[in-house]
Each structure stands twice: as C-alpha cells, then as structure tokens.
C-alpha cells in the first residue's frame, strides 16, 4: 500500500516592529505579493494581521521548521518581525475540508 506524504503544518506568531514607519509601509505591497504567491502555492494556509499591525499570525505548510525559516526569510518585512514557530498536530478549517476543483 502506497503511503501518502503530507507536509507538516506550523503556526507562526510574529511581533511586528515599527509598523507605522515609512520603511515598513513601503514594503507592504511587496510583502503582500510574496504572501499571495505562497498562498497560491499552498505554503501559507492562513495569514492574519492585527488591527494595530503589531501582530501577525499564519499557518504554513512545510517539510520542517528549517523550511519555514527559509520561507520567512523571503518576506520583505522580515527585518521588522520577531517570530516564534510552533509545529501543529493538526489544523482544521472549513475551506480546507472541501474537495479541490480542477479546471483542466
């Protein structure tokens, strides 16, 4: 019987520093582009920012914590972020429980 390999999931809890500075604000469009690409690729499952822009939470899918660190290093705003990474036993959400539709 063939085993299915599934990537591990991690929740990342980040404190954002100087979120209202000009340098931070100028990087937001490129940050959003990287996040959108990673979401499309299935690397980021959820991405949330607090109203005051001081906290960021996300769920990522990766092979290891080192891979998560590598993905985070691609964020334009990483210099403004202090992150903690927590491996998850599981992560359930309604949007992930529906079958994926193929348009080909």
Image (cartoon, rainbow, N blue to C red):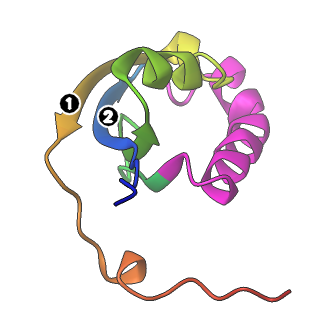
Q: Which mark is residue 86?
A: 1
Q: Which residues are magenta?
A: 18-44
Find the distance from the CA under tag 2 to the CA under tag 1.
6 Å
Does residue 24 appear to the left or right of 19 in the view shown?
right
Residue for point 57% across, 25% down = 71
* Most foreground residue, 19 or 55: 55
* Most foreground residue, 100 or 2: 2
Residue for point 35% across, 82% down = 97
Across and down, in percent, residue 55 comes to: 33, 37
Q: On screen, 23 above or below 45?
A: above
Q: Nearer the viewer, mark 2 or mark 1?
A: 1
Does residue 45 appear to the left or right of 73 in the view shown?
left
Query: Dot 1, crowdedness within 10 Å: few (<14), some or many (≥20)?
Result: few
Across and down, in percent, residue 36 comes to: 69, 53
Secondary structure of residue under mark 1: strand
Q: Is residue 27 magenta?
A: yes
User: Furthest residue to the left?
Assistant: 89
Give the quarter of the figure containing the N terminus.
bottom left
Q: Which mark is residue 12?
A: 2
Give the quarter of the figure containing the C terminus.
bottom right
């Amino acid at each position: 019987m063939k085993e299915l390999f599934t990537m591990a999931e991690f929740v990342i809890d980040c404190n954002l520093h100087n979120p209202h500075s000009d340098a931070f604000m100028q990087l937001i469009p490129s940050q959003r582009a990287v996040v959108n690409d990673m979401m499309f690729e299935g690397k980021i499952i959820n991405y949330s920012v607090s109203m005051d822009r001081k906290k960021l939470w996300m769920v990522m899918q990766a092979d290891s914590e080192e891979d998560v660190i590598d993905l985070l290093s691609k964020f334009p705003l990483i210099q403004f972020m202090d992150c903690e990474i927590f491996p998850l036993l599981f992560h359930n959400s309604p949007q992930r429980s529906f079958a994926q539709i193929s348009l080909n």
